Image (cartoon, helix red, strand yellow):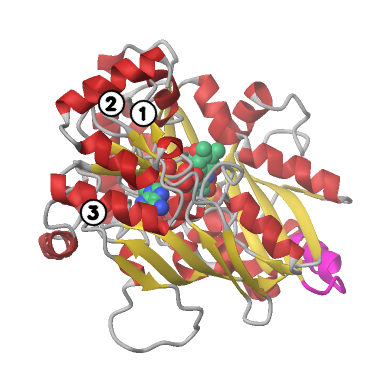
Amino acid sequence: MTQNAENFASAVAAAHPELLQRLHAAVGDAGLVLDPEAQAPYLRDWLGKWQGRAPVVVRPRDTAQTAAVMAICHETHTPVVTQGGNTGMSGGATPDGSGAQLVLSTARMNTIREVDPLNNSLTVEAGVLLAQVHAAAAEAGRFFPLSLGSEGSCTIGGNLATNAGGIAVLRYGNMRDLVLGVEAVLPDGRVWHGLRALRKDNTGYDLRHLFIGSEGTLGVITAAVLKLYPQPTARATAWVGAGDIQSLVSLQAQLRSRCGERLVAFEMMSQASLALVLKHVTATRAPLQGEHAYHALVELADTRAEGLPDLLEQSLGAALEEGLVQDVAICASTAQAHALWKLREGISQAQVRAGKAVKHDIALPISAIAGFVADADAALRALLPGVRIVNFGHLGDGNLHYNVLLPLDTPYAEYAAHTATLNREVHDRVHALGGSISAEHGIGQLRRDELPRYKSALEFELMMRIKQALDPNQIMNPGKLL
Ligand code: FAD
Ligand code: MLT
Ligand code: ZN
């Protein structure tokens, strides 16, 4: 231990009699992070929006160590914040400022336990990175479809706890749809062995779905059985420019009818979103000449190459002739397709560089999107003349990242006041249309105080009762979600 860590350890030991000693017995030297410098990355989210404190960061090596840690926390009523890759968008993995919440990192639980190509399944520990799952599936000649811009850093545990979405939900569903079994340590330290690799199991309540999307409030997910799919061997990718968002809504419906399951992605971005990436992330040329109010990145994929490029060309050709879209560029190579995906995936980073974002991760019935955008754009522009609206997202899923960008030098108080007003303007409209205020990023601390306004009292009560049943001491991620 460094001197710094030793000083800190004795301060923690003084403040928490026996806790440190017992945790040390459970996870050993390698499982405790005490040095304040080494702790720092665990105490702040990647957006730099939330900063917390913790007496200690614990890094159990496996399920048994996690169970031992949770049993100690249960007995001592020590609150626990579980953390995977710390790439979440809603502050769910950051402890609060009290200094009382322990951070439990899953980073060392990173073993791929089993790949079963015949069962089309793969069993992994919670701390395995999403990109490692992609590689393991590919090595076995299979495919795991969840795909996010953060896949090199986010973990399977985090993907499950947030029910992550991303760019392939249109074809494969979100994380909830990609899981056969879950193993979790309960708040009292008992292990629920739900690692079933079955596609059919009607033996009562499906408990895995309680943990999926629970944002660390019901227990620690330690492992999961994931579904594997046939590896697509052919892809056809295109960039489309359109004069308005309704044209893209109609185009995605047409492509779904024409291409069926072969349509795997339909990502939308406004001209303002594209301009941000071109300015702040990749200094390449725009994919199309001229300005188009809205753009879409469209991808077809299949296990057979025959007919795929023709299908894309004919479908988009028909849309051009009809005047539904203004221009189309079809990729001639995988390198070109990668370059286009880089543009799409660069938007998050571009926003961070370009301003202070007030983010909205909303879901709407696809048929309501164009009306919502027209109404919300007008309302926001009347409220804040000249405001920069960065609208992009997974249009094929009805999921918009309808963000507002304030200048980088906006003082905190002003940013907070604008955030409250903008959230209300956007979310009230979304709610009135039957939409959701969190499509894929979760509630965390970002949306916690807004949730009661948009969930019915009964739904809220049922959620509270489940929380009380599983976590009676309220030690799992307090201050998040509920
Ligand atoms: P963390 O951030 O560490 O944790 C997130 C939440 O899960 C916290 O509440 C935490 O307590 C809980 N948690 C983590 N691990 C466990 C566990 N083992 N057991 C119980 N609870 C746990 N998200 C999308 O859905 N779609 C996108 O398209 C998308 N794009 C992104 C692009 C970029 C560039 C970035 C940085 C993020 C993006 N995200 C996206 C958000 C983020 O990557 C996902 O939410 C991801 O699933 C979080 O995984 P993580 O391991 O980083 O979890
Ligand atoms: C994405 O789809 O790129 C992320 O979920 C959106 C974001 O950064 O807000
Ligand atoms: Zn997204």
How far is mark 1 from mark 2, CA to CA? 6 Å
Residue 119 relative to residue 329: left or right: left
Q: Horizontal and vertical percent for residue 20?
A: 26, 34
Whichever of labels 3 and 2 marks the residue nearer the N terminus, that label is 2
Prevailing SS of the magenta stretch: helix
Can residue 405 be seen in the rendering of this structure? yes
Q: Was residue 314 drawn as part of the magenta stretch in this picture? A: yes
Identify which residue, 62 or 349, lies in the foreground: 62
First in sequence: mark 1 vs mark 2: 1
- State the image coordinates of residue 234 (x, y, percent, origin top left): 81, 65
- Pick the residue in front: 284 or 322: 284
**Observer-nearest residue: 135 or 429?**
135
Residue 378 location (% of width, % of height): 38, 36
Q: Which residue is mark 3?
A: 71
Q: Tell me if 236 is positioned left or right of 429 in this view.
A: right
| Residue occupied by mark 2 | 53
What is the total number of numbered labels drawn onto the structure image? 3
Highlighted magenta segment, given as a residue range: 303-317
Tell me where residue 158 appears, x and y as whole percent.
Answer: 44, 50
Q: Which mark is in front, 1 or 3? A: 3
> Which badge, 1 or 3, is on the more N-terminal residue?
1
Residue drawn where x is 74% and y is 24% of the image? 283
> Are there few (<14), some (14-19), or many (20+) residues within 10 Å of tag 2?
many
Q: Secondary structure at mark 2?
A: loop
Residue density around tag 1, few if under 14, some if 14–19, many if 20 or more, within 10 Å: many
Q: Amino acid at mark 3?
A: Ala
Is 90 one of the magenta-colored residues?
A: no
Image position of 421 (left or right of 228): left
